[in-house]
Image (spheres, rainbow, N blue to C red):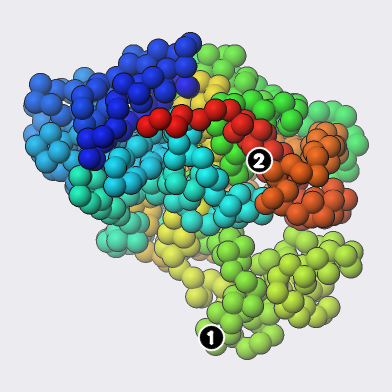
Amino acid sequence: MRAGNFIGVFSRNGTVSMPAVHAALCNGDVSVFGSVNNEVAFFQNDRKGNIVKDDDGWVICGKAEIYNREDVCKKLAIGNQPANDLELILQAFKKTGSSTPGLLNGAFSFAIWDPQTEALFAARDHIGLFPLFYFISERLFFFSDSIKLLSKFAFARCLNNSKIIQLLQKTYGDKEQTIFEEIQSLSPAYSICVDRKKSVCRKYWALSAVLPSRVQNLEDAAEGLQDRLLIAMRTRLDGDLNVGIELSGGLDSSSIAVLASQIADRKELFAFSNVLPVAHKQSFAGFSDEWDKATMVADHLGLPAPTAIDHIEDPVTLSESIIEQAGIPFNFYLSFYQTGIYKAAACQGVGALFSGFGGDEGISMQVGQRYVVSMVRQLQLQSLFCHYSKMGLFRGKAVVATAYQVGRYALRNKHRENRRYLLNRYNHLLFTNDLLEDDLNRKQYLGDDYFKHYSPGERMNFFMTSGGTTARLESGYFISGAYGLSYKYPFLDVSVLEYFYSLPDALKVNADGDRAVLRKAMEGLLPASIINQPKQPAIASATVPFHRVERERHFERVKDYLMSLSESHQLFDFWDRNKLSSLRLGVHNSYIEGKYYDQLLAGMMLSLFLQQQKATTFHEI
């Protein structure tokens, strides 16, 4: 049971044995503290305040970091200062009921027992920074921030075949699904209220519902963004924690470093960045990292030199550790490779790690190509082609726009096997050579047609509600938490997102590109070369480690591990062994290789997970 985890149960018909639940959670070497009666029980594995009770019988259990505490207290006339954020939420709920989550700005995952209505109310934060899993039946309602804890019970015996296939394909389907058929994940910005007779799930917040702003010029827009980002940073700084920054030298992470340096003692700020080993720089022509830019930013701000991370953990050993800690396999995104930063941060006593994640997805690249790239991954190519056609594009332009978005990486490589791979994978849409090989033609047709039909607000809303964003945040939560770190994302602050969404689209894009507001906000704070740099992929940065140049060395172990599994291994109930054999051969293309290795890693994590599930589960409940 990981430090700080919580779990609760509501016996809807009074037949659940709370002592039996307690016994299932106590595994001999873990002490579980809780609040127990005949109807509802809350448990935690430490004394850090995951449970708060009052004299009237109200109880809240969960985790919370609320960043607008003063505003909530003032708005609701909460006179006595709450001792912690959970107590604040409880007091707010007693005044405003189910409207409470919409008043909060922060990271939270909680459940409240209401003794007056004899109902349990649970909610998850707007973006999904903290997870909340649950099982519900006519008999009981279980919830926890740890799916590993829920897996101790009988309802976790059946695996979710659909989710397993999604993991192996690295796709992001229904956000409510988990690896267990009967356990669900509460979606971001949702609440659920459960009493003895019914349960009601409700969405309490939507970015698309934000009203337009009256800001009319770029200078005012930039000033408003800077003010809100500064508040977002200040409210996330904890005086008891050393602060770490994932610093790549890009505009997003550099902006976070600027804001942190204005608030915290610069001598107590620690920057971390991946840097290619000298041998890699010599061996891999054309590969580069962002170390020079990261050190330039640190020097400009008077920060200590960034800590250089020049190695990647062994993926087999790392996967074993992750499965043990989190209890589930998941689409790990880049967090899997960032463990070098996590380990270095933990060694330097860093408790809060600030990330620029959310800048690209929210306020700086929301009109870039990634929106359609993500959409293509969810749709058949033919469907997207029809979509373009219905918008009035003639066939040539529709084909170009569709092909470019899916194959913009793969098509740089002219190997015919890659072309056949794309044709087979994406519904046999006809790609003609003149469209494939003429970069100027693709860019010319893509630009105006694409930007004309998708507003910045639409793209921003897509990112904030996509399964990929949720998966990225959950993987960061699970893996960094194993190192005792708390991730902070100032760009994902609710007030920042709402403000930027409300701005007129014309202010968000100008002749200098799609990062106009953030660039203007950073004028005078960062070197011009950092502010005006184009968005380019790098082989190593704070958020893009150099795993591509070490694949062959590390992933031979992964391939050998998977091929060593017996023909009857459970993994092959979900994954055709012939598919594994073909993946083992590899594909010589950077874009497809990324998918290929991710699939191999997902297969390995699944096999380790299936091996772990042979442990005895609790059946008496």
> Residue 31 appears at what percent x and percent y?
40, 12
Expressed as whole percent of the image width and height from the top left, the position of residue 268 reads: 49, 16
Looking at the rendered structure, the secondary structure element under dot 1 is: helix
User: Observer-nearest residue: 443 or 154?
Assistant: 154
For this view, does 109 lie left or right of residue 114? right
Query: In which image quadrant can residue 603 be found?
Result: top right
Quadrant containing the C terminus in the rendered view: top left
Left or right: 415, with 105 as reference point: right
Which residue is rendered at x = 9% and y = 26% of the image? 56
Q: List the residue tagged with mark 2.
A: 606
Q: Is residue 614 left or right of residue 278?
A: left
Residue indicated by mark 1 = 390
Residue 466 in the figure: left or right of residue 199: right
Residue sitting nearer the eye, 515 or 471:
471
Rendering coords of residue 428 (x, y %): 74, 76
Task: Point out the frontmost of discs 1 and 2.
Answer: 2
Circle 2: residue type: Leu
**How many residues crowd around disc 1 within 10 Å: few (fewer than 14), some, or many (20 or more)?**
few
Instruction: Name the residue at 53% across, 14% down.
Output: 349
Tell me the distance, in whole angstroms, between the alpha carbons under discs 1 and 2.
Answer: 41 Å
Q: What residue is at 53 percent from the left and 85 percent from the top?
A: 390
